[in-house]
Image (spheres, rainbow, N blue to C red):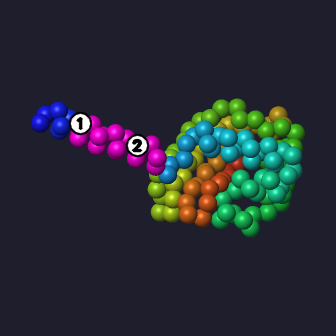
């Protein structure tokens, strides 16, 4: 009887572990790759390709205008180069009512050309799709 109880308990534990690993969360490496691919397209000024990395909710965003304004405001040059210098933090949520799905925010210090700046990218996965949902760029002080 003890052996049967142990096997049942072990089966339940394995089932719970497998459900946890299959959750709808977003992994950090996934967002790092998404960020690198997105900025690769921005650097090449391939706005149609860059748009494919955005969440469908941002379909109306004019990326070319956005990045021209950011470059002018902060003195950055994304066509010269983009490099993540250091990841400084992250926040993950398996479910957020704000986006009706899972989200992963990655903060980093980066450079565009030779100029450093702070970057925060939030990726969202929900019923509408997956992609970059927020982009926050600020001066590195």
- Per the model, the C-alpha gap separating discs 2 and 1 is 16 Å
Residue receiving disc 2: 18
Report the front residue among 16 and 59: 16
Q: Please name the residue shown 70% across and 48% down the image.
A: 137
Residue behind mark 1: 7
Q: Dot 2, crowdedness within 10 Å: few (<14), some or many (≥20)?
A: few
Q: Which residues are magenta?
A: 7-23
Farthest residue in the bottom direction?
A: 60
Q: Is residue 58 magenta?
A: no
Across and down, in percent, residue 41 comes to 81, 47
Is residue 125 shown to the viewer in this render?
Answer: yes
Whether residue 17 is in magenta: the answer is yes
Residue at x 58% of width, y 55% of height? 124
Residue at figure coordinates x 71%, y 35% from the top left? 84
Question: Which mark identifies residue 108?
Answer: none
Front residue of this view, candidates 18 and 34: 18
For the residue pair 127 and 121, the one nearer the viewer reads as: 127
Question: Which quadrant is home to the N terminus?
Answer: top left
Q: Is residue 52 left or right of residue 108?
A: right
* Classed neighbour count for the residue bearing mark 1: other residues with Cα under 10 Å, few (<14), some (14–19), many (≥20): few
Q: Where residue 134 appears, x then y in whole percent?
A: 64, 55
């Amino acid at each position: 009887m003890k052996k049967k109880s142990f096997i049942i308990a072990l089966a339940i534990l394995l089932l719970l572990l497998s459900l946890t690993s299959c959750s709808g969360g977003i992994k950090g490496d996934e967002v790092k790759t998404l960020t690198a691919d997105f900025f690769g397209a921005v650097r090449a000024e391939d706005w149609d390709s860059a748009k494919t990395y955005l969440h469908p909710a941002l379909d109306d965003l004019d990326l070319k205008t956005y990045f021209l304004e950011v470059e002018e405001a902060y003195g950055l040059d994304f066509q010269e180069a983009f490099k993540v210098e250091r990841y400084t933090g992250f926040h993950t949520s398996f479910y957020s009512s704000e986006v009706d799905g899972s989200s992963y925010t990655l903060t980093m210090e980066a450079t565009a050309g030779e100029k450093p700046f702070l970057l925060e990218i939030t990726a969202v996965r929900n019923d509408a799709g997956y992609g970059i949902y927020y982009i926050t760029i600020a001066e590195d002080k």
